[in-house]
Amino acid sequence: MPDQTSHKPVMLITGTRKGIGNYLANYYLNKGFIVIGCSRGELDLKSENYIHYCLDVADENKVKNIFRDLKRDFGRLDVLINNAGIASMNHSMLTPLSTVKKIFDTNVTGTFLFSREAAKIMRKSTGGRIVNLTSVAVPLKLAGEAIYAASKAAVNNLTQILAAEFADFGITVNAIGATPLRTDLIKNVPEEKIAKLISKLSIKRLGEFEDVVNAVEFFIKPESNYITGQILYFGGV
Amino acid sequence: MFIKTTDNMITKDEIIEIIFNSIDEINEQNRSSIPKEASTTLFGSQSELDSLGLVHLITSIEEKTEEATGKNITIADEKAMSLSYSPFKTVETLANYIKTLVDA
Ligand SMILES: NC(=O)c1ccc[n+]([C@@H]2O[C@H](COP(=O)([O-])OP(=O)(O)OC[C@H]3O[C@@H](n4cnc5c(N)ncnc54)[C@H](OP(=O)(O)O)[C@@H]3O)[C@@H](O)[C@H]2O)c1
């Protein structure tokens, strides 16, 4: 259990079991943050400054429990990163309704619930930061990614409207529009599809975890208190 | 300052006390003087609160009620938003509504 009396910044990251969320959790633990993470699966991260919750990000009651504990244990939250996300790359005529619902639940409802609860605790101190994960699939309008892209388009809109609503509380809300990155999210996407996507970028390479960290760092630094409602796409999209 | 109950139970009077504490907070923050009475209008054209003030107030009441009961509640739930007579209208109607939420 982290030292509750410390003045270490408190960051909540969703989807920390693997991929980008896992990288960010380790990165910010190394930087001296207290990191609260969650995913459906377990994560045994060996750090006294890490707390893990097993939950589905769309489960309102469980999400509220995290925030109840956060309030009790730390009394504040400095940064929320809405990273948990799923994708299904498929032609829309071959996409089952259950997949549509699952993607929207995770990517949109999850982002909304965490942001709503975060704002309630962040409103007490100025300088709260919310960073959402979105994708270049939105502006590139990629065939085969209809539902994923639609869910991320919703995340973009949510980012911009929450930015307007939360500005009164000194909270900024921004989003990172990542290009393909080697994680399980894209492991079933055929190489030629990825190559085709990369050919549409100005800078023709895959994204790296460090690119995401760089953008997070920019959004959360105190000097970025005038930057809100922005969708930052990588690779020149 | 909040009332801590042991068994999730909270009386309507205790809820009204919580609402008054939250009104104190808002008054202090906004240098306003919203009266602490059961009949005080919180929502609608008669209310002294602007929409942001109402957000602050409801969030603060929700938090204090959760602290007092140890129960998760969402005051602005579907039912509250769909009732033809808004439960946010006055301190009294809000207290009644919160009572139904914590007793559920
Ligand atoms: N990789 C890319 O190419 C790429 C590109 C653009 C944007 N992004 C975005 O970046 C974010 C992270 O993706 P990633 O590449 O790191 O994916 P990933 O490797 O598949 O990891 C996804 C993470 O989210 C968690 N998760 C999934 N559904 C969840 C749910 N319902 N409730 C709680 N946790 C859940 C997973 O853990 P559990 O399975 O244990 O729940 C896992 O930790 C996503 O929002 C994604 O859309 C990724």
Image: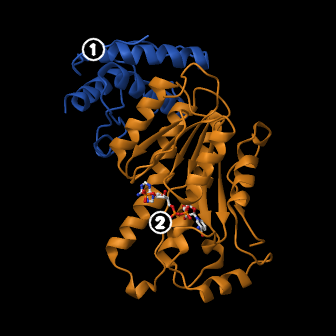
Chain colours: A orange, B blue
* In this rendering, position of residue B69 left or right of residue A89: left
* Neighbour tally class for label 1: few under 14, some 14-19, many 20 plus, Cα within 10 Å: some
Considering only vertical position in the picture, is B69 above or below A68? Answer: above
Q: Look at 63% across and 82% down and name the residue there.
A: A194
Residue A84 relative to residue B78: left or right: right
User: Where, by quadrant of the figure, is residue A32 drawn?
Assistant: top right
Q: Secondary structure at mark 1?
A: loop
Give the residue pinned by disc 2: A86
- Specify the label residue A137 is tagged with: none
Q: Chain of mark 1?
A: B
| Residue located beneath label 1 in the image | B5
Question: Where is residue A59 drawn, in percent x and y?
Answer: 35, 49
Looking at the rendered structure, the kind of residue marked 1 is Thr
Q: Is residue A37 above or below residue A158?
A: above
- Badge nearest the viewer, 1 or 2: 2
Please give the name of the residue rendered at 40% of the width and 60% of the height, measured from the top-left corner.
Answer: A105
Residue B23: x and y in percent read 47, 17
Task: Give the residue at x 19% y 33%.
Answer: B104
Crowding near the residue tagged with mark 2, few <14, some 14–19, many ≥20 C-alpha atoms within 10 Å: some
| Residue A171 rendering spot, x and y as whole percentages | 64, 38
What amino acid type should be assigned to the residue bearing mark 2?
Answer: Ile
Residue B98 coordinates in the image, percent (x, y): 29, 28
Looking at the picture, tell me which residue is in the foreground, A31 or A202: A31
Q: Secondary structure at mark 2?
A: loop
Q: CA distance from mark 1 to mark 2?
A: 41 Å
- Cβ of mark 2 under 8 A from ligand 1: yes
Q: Is residue B43 visible?
A: no
**Both marks 1 and 2 on one chain:** no
User: Does residue B61 appear anywhere in the picture?
Assistant: yes
Q: Pick out the residue farthest to the front.
A: A46
Nearest the camera: B11 or B88?
A: B11
Seen from the viewer's position, the closer of residues A26 and B62 is A26
